[in-house]
Image (cartoon, rainbow, N blue to C red):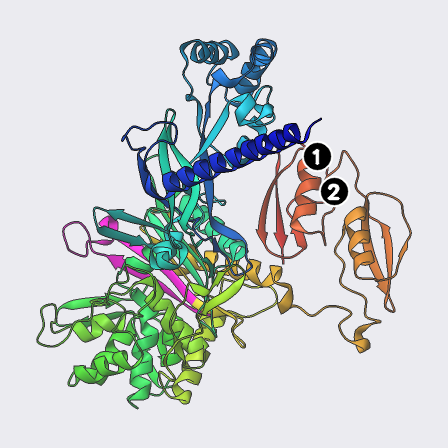
Amino acid sequence: MSKDTKNFLYYRAYLIYFGFVIIMLVVLYKTVSLQLEGRKNIFTSSDEKIPVRTVSRIPRMGDILDHNLTPLVTSVTYYDVRMDATVVEQKLFDEEVSELAQGLSKMYPEKTAREYENSIRNARSTGNRYLLIQKNVTNEERKMIRKLPIYREGRMKGGLIDTEEIIKRQFPNGSLLRRTLGYYKNDGGKELKVGIEGAFYNYLKGEEGKEIEHRISTGWKKTGQITKEAVEGADVISTLDKEIQEFAHSELEKQLRDMKAEHGCVIVMDVKTGYVRAIANLDRTEEGKFNEGYNHAIGTKEVPGSTFKLASLMAALEDGKINIMDKVDAVGSYVFKGKTFTDSNHGIGYGRITIKHAFEKSSNVITQIIHRAYRNEPEQFLKRIEQFGLTEPLGIDLEGEPSPNVPRPGNPGWWALSIPMMSIGYDFQQTPLQTLAFYNAVANNGKLVRPLFVEEIRRSGQTIKKFEPVVLRDKICSQSTLDDMKACLKGVMTDGTGAALKSIEFKIAGKTGTAKLVGDNKLYNDEKNSTYQASFVGYFPADDPIYSCIVVISKPKVAYYGAAVSGTVFAAIANKVYASTLKYHDAINEKKQRSNQAPIIKTGNKKDITAVLKKLQVRYQLNYEGDWLQADTVKGSVHLNRTSIPKNQVPKVFGMTAKDAIYLLESRGLIVKIKGYGKVVSQSILAGTEITKGQLIKIQLQ
């Protein structure tokens, strides 16, 4: 080959190479120009511009968790699934479109396989490149769809198009806590903030990002150019405990149903910190069911009734007007300016008793005591009530807390009997949370703390804000007054209106309350036409308080006294919380000196007993291979022996847990009714009695 020919070929190669380079640079320039400015189409010289817009990138909202990090509210992303059937190769389409339709019909049976297939074939024939397959598809469903025939080939070959639709808030626990968890709405600039989500929305929402889109034949499409990254919302760690919440919710609902009540609420609070561990609010619906329609615990203020007697006697003690052991004549009926106040035993009275015992029995002789003490200086009584923190709202983070209604001399609502009325919880209104905060201060040795619903805020696992306990008053009264009233609250449970409410391993301190409510005629009606509010508020264990709790049940129809209606709920919650919280119980092998001490073992199923003993590394001797065993402890060792469980006779369930006893008795066709907590101590049908199926047997636990 000649030199000229070689040079020609070199020049030609260089020309082609640099030509391609120039073309690529032009294409790159036009692409960048299009992305940045939306200028001319790179394939035409026309002045027509491609539509470009900047859209928001919505961040994922943060979760609301309980204090053990269990999700209470979370965000779920939903997608619209569409299809461009025109990009699928004919052979693949013919072979797999029927199978694809069957798969879609299994996932979304609102359409038959034939209907799905017809719509896909029609879209292919008409050139519809954006056929809607399904709206609001979850991410899990989206993954399943991608595995279906044709779609598994991807977007370019299978025509699958899934676009982000919306991020929705989900409540994993159904109706539990719905009102307290709340929501946020912005209706035309008018913000509605409800519950934790409303109060902490600015943390939860994150920050919007910005992204460029341009319009193509199938609609607007993201270009991938992000001008501002979105910042995901922070997680809110609430003070709530899901397990305690479930206890409170279920016990309240059961009692509302049994008492045929209109609505009720429960609050459980950590004494030292003010952290709210549970808050249940339930309203009866027209169908007779119960749901969280309104947050009565925070927003409904009503006369507290006899639970206010604690504040009344505290005021008189602080002012030196009484001694808690002073004697009074509790005759059962007390008249002031033509108005009569009576005790619950209607005229019988309690005789000459101490003021302490009058409080324990919730006698309305307290109206007489407080009237005599403050009839000439009502402002002094109100000053003490203010000192206790009862005249102002608590200032909680959640919206909707009203101020207490406090009558004052010279104001509308004040009259000659305001002091005696207030002394027993009338002519004064506050919310259940405000009542509980006061009792919690007594349990907390006088320190009034603000109820809190959030412990901290976290983003990407890092704490960005922590909410420490807030002390509103270091000491609401003197120590001597506190000591006297703590003794009174314990006395309510041993010698007073709460004596029937028993606990297993710990003492309760508290006060019952029964308040008559104003009728639709704005008057207190006679007993037959009256409605009532039953309440119980206190703390446990009495000697070293961990939790305070209030139960309020409005308009019960079966009974209305505080102990029977609300106190039973309080006791059930207290027992469940205490029994299920391991940190309140010593381990049997915690100390060396206890290593030879055998644990208390209830009669029960062999599998359960042996599993627990192995877990606790307690040695035992198995003397019987049957399913049901009873234990004997001899000098620290455990012997598991047979317990007789005949099939045709009522079994002996002494010493068993409720779970095992109910299983055994119901498996033999008996109907079981239980009472109490702990282990079985008695049964209404003697062991060995011939079984009659459908017969009721009552078992007592203690």
Q: Secondary structure at mark 2?
A: loop
Q: CA separation, marks 2 and 1?
A: 9 Å
The reply to whether residue 612 is in sight is yes
Instruction: Give the residue drawn at x 23%, y 84%.
Output: 373
Q: Secondary structure at mark 1?
A: loop
Report x, y in % for residue 277.
Answer: 48, 62
Residue 206 lies in what quarter of the image? Answer: bottom left
Give left or right: position of 611 versus 98. Answer: right
Instruction: Give the residue drawn at x 45%, y 76%.
Output: 443
Between 399 and 482, the one nearer to me in the picture: 399
Q: Identify the image quadrant of the N terminus.
A: top right
> Which residue does the numbered mark 1 point to in the structure image?
668
The tag on residue 533 is none
Instruction: Give the residue drawn at x 82%, y 43%.
Output: 627
For label 2, the crowd category at 10 Å Cα-Cα, with few meaning under 14, some 14 to 19 and many 20 or more, is: many
Between 40 and 10, the one nearer to me in the picture: 10
Contact between labelled residues 1 and 2, with CB atoms less than 8 Å apart:
yes
The tag on residue 651 is 2
As drawn, 150 above or below 384 = above
Report x, y in % for residue 422.
Answer: 23, 71
Q: Is residue 487 magenta?
A: no
Badge 2 or badge 1: first in the primary sequence:
2
Q: Amino acid at mark 2?
A: Pro
The reply to whether residue 348 is in sight is no
As drawn, 643 above or below 145 = below
Report x, y in % for residue 641.
Answer: 86, 52
Segment tinted magenta in the rendering = 509-537
As drawn, 605 above or below 668 = below
Between 110 and 462, the one nearer to me in the picture: 462
Report x, y in % for residue 391.
Answer: 25, 74
Q: Identify the image quadrant of the C terminus.
A: bottom right
Instruction: Give the residue drawn at x 59%, y 22%.
Output: 148
